[in-house]
Amino acid sequence: MMTDNFDPNDDMSWLDDTNDRSSDDLGAAFGADDLLPDWGLSDDAFNPLIPGAGASMEDDFDALFGGNADDLTGVADPESPAVITDEIPAWLQASAPDPAVPSTDDLAQLAAPDSPEGVPAWLDTQEMEAAPVANKEDVPPWLAEADETAEEVIAQAEERAKAMPAVAPGDAESFLPPWLQDADDLGAADANAFEASFDSLEFDVDESAAPLSMGGDFSDPFAMVSAPSSGEDMPEWLRTREQPPMVAQDDELAMFLSQDLPGDDTEDLLGNLLGGGSDAPDIDLLSLLEKVDNEGAAVKTGMLVSGTTPPPDDGLQDLEMPDFDALMTEETPPPATPYSPILDEPSAPADPELDLAALFGEPQAEPLPPLDDIPAPPPAAPRSAMSAVTPPAPKPASTDSEYDAFLDSLRGDDWEDLPPVSSEPLDLARLLNDPALDKPSDPRAIIASSELDEPVLPEFLRGVSVSDASAASLLRQQQDVPLDELSDELRALHDELAAIGTAAAAAAPAALPILQPADALPRPAVGLNDAQRRAAELLRSLTVVSAGGDDPAAVVRATQARAGRRRLLSNVVRLAVVSLILLAFIAPFISDAGVLRFAAPPPQAFVPNSTAANAYGLIEELPRGALVLVSVDYSPGAIGELDALTTQVVRHVFARGAVPVVIGSDAVTLQHVGRLVDEMAGRRRQRNDEYVIGRYLLGEAVGTQAFVRNLGSLLRRDIDGLPTGLDVTSIDDFASIIVLTDRSDTVRVWAEQVQVQTRVPLSYAVGVGAAPLSRPYVRADGRLLVGLRDAMTYAYQLDQRYRTTAAPASVTATLQNRWYGVSLGAVVVLGLVVLGSFAGIVQIIFRRRR
Amino acid sequence: MRVRLSAVLLTALTMTFGLLTLVVLVAGDGTSGIAALINQTPLPELVAFLLRLVVIITAVAVLAGVFNLLAVHVRRIRAQRSMALYSVVMLVSFMLVVLLSFRPQADEARAALEDVQVGLELAFSSLVLFSLVYGAATLLSRRPRWTSALFLVAVVGVLLTAAFPAPNTLVGQIMDWVNAVPVDAGTRAILLGIGLATLVAGIRVLVGQDRATRE
C-alpha cells in the first residue's frame, strides 16, 4: 500500500513477486515488466484468457483470507497447476475448471489487463469464478442448492434475453429512466448545476437519537455502516445476533442494484437487500469493497458516513463486526460468521462471481447455518429515507409473508414492464475499475461505464445517481452534533481544545501593523527601540520612499538621479586614477625636474658573481664569429621593459664580433626585434652575414623541441624567406643561448627541452613579473637578467667597456627617463593603493556604525 | 564493452610514437651503451620528422583559425548585425596588410605591425595595469577580509622596494628575505606541482589512458 510515509528502508520483500513466469508473460506482453506493479503482474495469473492460468479460487481465498500473509501478493503461478492443500475443503479439492460455464469468458474478458489500474491483484481475484464442482456430493446441501438455483436462473435469463428484441447501443438511452435521461441531456457546462441539484437531498433523521459513535476508527470497515434511525427500532434479530444493520449508501446501492442480476432471483436478492423495507440492514457492497481495497477507502468511508447525520445510538458500537483489515493478515483469527441476509438467504442465487462468503472472511468455508435457525427479523421502524427522493416506502417485512408481500409490491406493473435483466454475473472487477467512479460528475459517463442500460432500479432509488457529488453535498449538509449529545470523552476533548484556543488568542498580538509609507508610519504604536528605529531609517533610505514620497514618478527620478550620481562619481574616480598613472609615467620624459627623478639610479656595474654578472661575463667571453642564439619570446606588451635588455645583449654580441641569430615565439615581437637589430647593425653589418633574423617558432614545448632537432632546416631561411647561409646542424653549434621572455613558462620550456640535452650555456633575461618563477630554474651560478634595472646596469657596463660600439645615442637617456618614469609610477600606484585601502577601511567603519 | 576501431588506432599510434620520442630523448646524443645503439638507428631522424610534422600541423591549424576568423566576420556582415562595422574594419585591415606584404621590401607591412599592433598590445598592457591598481585600491571596500589586507601589505612592500630601491636598508633586507625564502619556496612548490602534473599527464598518454585518445 502506498502511503505518504513510505520508507524505502523497510522490508520490501513483499515486492519480490514469486510469480516470475507470470511476470515474464506480462513483461513480454507489455515490453517492460519492471514497470508493472506486482498486482499487475499477478493479475495475469488469474486471467482466464491467458493459457495456463490455472489458479483456482481455492488458492485465491486461501492466500487472501486463510493463507500466509505473504501469499497475498504472491499469487499462484499461472503455468503451474493449482496446488490443492489440506486447507481446502474436500468438496472444493474435487472441483476442476469447467470451461463450459458460460460466465467464464465474460469474466475473463472483463478481467483482462486492459485496465489493470485501480484494483489490486488480491481484490481482482475475488471476482474470479469459483471452479465448478465436480463432485457435487461433497458440496454442502445449501451450497449445492444455490448452484442449482444459479444454473436455473442463468438458463431462464438466457431464454428471456432471447425473447427480448435486440437493443441497439444507440437505443439504450430510450430505456433510461427519466432522471437519467435528464442527466444525460446536461452538458459539461451544467455539470456543476447538476451536482448542485443533489444538494437538495436530505435525510430524515431521528434527531433525538444518540449519535453514532464511530470511535474515531475509520479504518473499521463497518464504520461505513450507519445505523437504523433508533435504537429502539433495532430489530430483535439484529440485537440477538449483534449484527449491525447497514444503511446502504444509496448511490452505491443503486449502482449495485443496477447491475444485471440473475432472472427472477433478482427479486429475492433485492428483497434481501432491502430487508423487508427501509429498516432492514442494507449492505454497502461498493463501500465495503473499496474499504477492503487500499487507498481512498478511508476517504470514501468518511465521506459516506459523514454524509449522513449521525444516527442515534442504537448500540451498534458494541456489535462485533468482522475486521476486514484483520482479515488481510494471517495472525488475526477469522471472526465469527456475520449474518448477511444476502449470503444466508437460501433463495438468493449463488452467484459464482459474488462469493461474498469468501469475501467477508470465511477462510474455512464452513457451512453456513440453515436459514431456519436464524430468527426472522422482526418489524422495524422505517429506516432513514431520503426526503428528496420520496420513494414509496414499502412496509417493513419481518416475516416471510411480509417479505413476499413486499416483493409483490415491487413486482408491480412497472416491474413487469421492465426489460429482462441480463444473466451475466455481477462483475465487481469491472465495477471497481469503472473510470466513471473517478469522474462521477458526468452522468453520461456513469451511464455508459456502469452499463445502466436497464432501468431495474426500484422507484425510491430512481432519484439517486452514482456520484461523489451527492456524497459531497451530503458532506456539506453535515451538521455539528450538539454538545449535549457528545460523550463525556468527546466533551472533555472539546473543552480542552476550546481552552487552548482561548489561551492562544490571548497570547497572540492584537494585529500585525501594516507597513506604511515612512511619513505615515505610526512609530509609537509599533514601539521600536533605537536599533530598530535606525534599521527602519536605513530601510527607508534604501527604498527611497522618503525621497520620492508617494509619487512613483518622483521615486523613479530620484533613483535614476542617485544612480547617475553614483556612476559619475565612479567614472571620475577611475579617470583620476588613470590620469595620475599616466602622468607619473610620462612626466620624467617631459620634465627633468628633480622632484620627478627622485629614484636612485641603478648600479653602474653588476654585482660580481651575481646571476646578471654571469650572463654578462658569458657574452663577454664569446669569440669572434661565434653563433649566439637569441630567442625573443616576450609579447609586445613587454617591449617597454625587455627591449632594453634585448638591445644591450645584441650590442654586446655585436661588440664581441659574434653573430646573433634571432628567433622568437611571438611573430609581432620578432618583427619588432628584427627592425631593432637592423637599426643597431646599421650599414656596417650585413643581414644574414653578421646577424640573422630567423624564423617564427610556434608550438611552445613541441615547437622548441622541433627547432632543436631540426636546426638545419629551420634556420635555412630568415624571417623574410631569404637564405641565411648558416651551416648549423645541432644546437651545440651555438656558443651561447640567450632567452628573453616575460613569462616563466618559456623559461621552463627552454630549461626542460633544451638545457637538458646540450652543454651550451643558457642565459635568461626576464621581466620583473616572471623573475620569481624563473629563479628556481637558474642555478646559483646561472645567468639571469631581470628587468629594466639590469638593462640599465648592462648599458652602463657596456658603455664603460665598449665606448666605440655603435648604438643609438638616445639609449641611455631613454633608459634613464623610463627608469624615472617607472619609479614615479610605482610611487603613484603605491599612493593610490594606500589611499584606496584607507577609504575602504573608513567605509567599513561607517557601515558598522550605521 | 564497446571499442571503437578509430579510438584503438589513435591510442596505439599515440602510445607508439610517444614511447619512441621518449626513448630518443632519453638517449640524447649519447655515444655509449643503449644511447649509442639507439642513435645508430633511424629513430632520431624519425622523431625529428615527427616533431617537424607536428609543428607544420600546428601552423596549418593557425592558418585554419585565421580563415575561421574571417568567416565569422563575413557572416556577421551578411547578417547585418549592429557590430558589423567592426567586422568590416577588421576585414579591410586584414586585406590591406596582406596586400602590403607582397611588396618587395614590405616596409609598410612592418610599419603596420610596429605602429599598430605593438601599440595596441601596449595599450592592453596599460589597461591591465590600471585594472590592477584600481582593484587593489578598492579591495578593502569590496572584500574586507584579512586575506585582502595581507595581499595589500605585500603589494605595498613590493612597490616600496621598486620605487625606493635600498638594498642596504632594513626594508630592503626584509624584502630580499621575502623574495629569497617565502616567495622562492612558494614558487618552487608551484613548479613541483606543475612538474608532477606534467609527469602524470605524460604517463597517461604513454599508457593510453589520456582522455584525448581514450574515447
Image (cartoon, coloured by chain):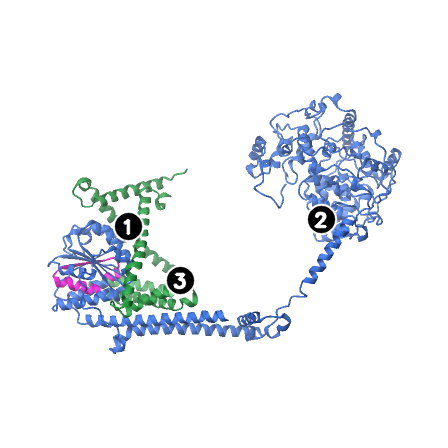
Chain colours: A blue, B green
10 Å crowding of disc 1: few (<14), some (14-19), many (20+): few
Residue bearing the label numbered 1? B57
Labels 2, 3: front one? 3
Residues at circles 2 and 1 in contact by the CB criterion of under 8 Å: no
Number of numbered discs on residues: 3
10 Å crowding of disc 2: few (<14), some (14-19), many (20+): many
Q: Position of residue A638 (x, y in %)?
A: 27, 64
Picture quarter with the N terminus of chain A: top right
The amino acid type found where label 2 is placed reads Ser
Residue bearing the label numbered 3? B147
Chain assignment, label 2: A
The amino acid type found where label 1 is placed reads Ile
The amino acid type found where label 3 is placed reads Thr
Residue bearing the label numbered 2? A441
Please indicate whether residue B46 sits to the left or right of residue A84 in the image. left
Kindly state the secondary structure of the residue where label 1 is placed: helix
Residues at circles 3 and 1 in contact by the CB criterion of under 8 Å: no
| Residue A654 colored in magenta in the image | yes
Q: Where is residue A121 in the image (x, y as percent from the top left)?
A: 64, 35
Which segment did they paint magenta?
A644-670
